[in-house]
Image (tube, rainbow, N blue to C red):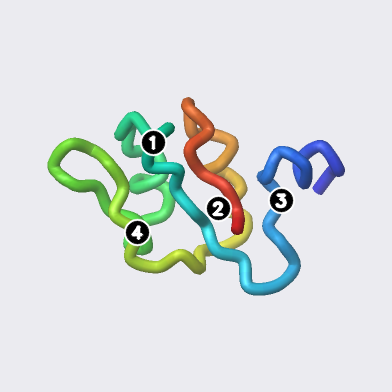
Amino acid sequence: MSIRDRLAGIAAPDTDARLAVDRVACEGRGICSELLAPAFTSDEWGYPIVHDEHVDADLGATAIRLCPVRALRWR
């Protein structure tokens, strides 16, 4: 990954990567739930329910990139 991706929070940290959702920024589009199932599912309004924060690094990076409101990040 490039330094730009690392600074933007797209590149997974080297150890114990966990994906977090910014609940205030999230608009419930459901893209993360589609990409990261079964670790993420959607509630009845489309907002993500996180069952497992440890997701595949490549899928996590893709979900971060595709989130239209940038509500996903590595922590």
Mark 3, residue position: 11
What is the distance, in whole Å, between disc 3 and disc 4 at their CAs?
A: 20 Å
Crowding near pointer 3: few (<14 within 10 Å), some, many (20+)?
many
Label 1 and label 4: CA atoms lie apart by: 15 Å
Is 59 placed above or below 46 here?
Answer: below
Q: Label 4: how many residues lie within 10 Å, few (<14), some (14-19) or many (20+)?
A: some
Ranked by sequence position, the earlier of labels 4 and 2 is 4
x and y, in percent, of residue 59 in the image: 55, 53
Q: Which mark is residue 24?
A: 1
- Identified by mark 1, the residue type is Val
* Rendered image: mark on residue 60: 2
Residue type for callout 2: Gly
Q: Name the residue at 27% across, 41% down.
A: 47
Which of disc 4 and disc 3 is earlier in sequence?
Answer: 3
Using the numbered discs, state the Cα–Cα distance from disc 2 to disc 1 in whole angstroms.
Answer: 19 Å
Q: Residue at x 68, y 45 (%)?
A: 9
Looking at the rendered structure, the secondary structure element under dot 4 is strand
- Where does residue 18 sit, x and y in percent of width and height? 55, 63
Say left or right for 23 vs 53. Answer: left
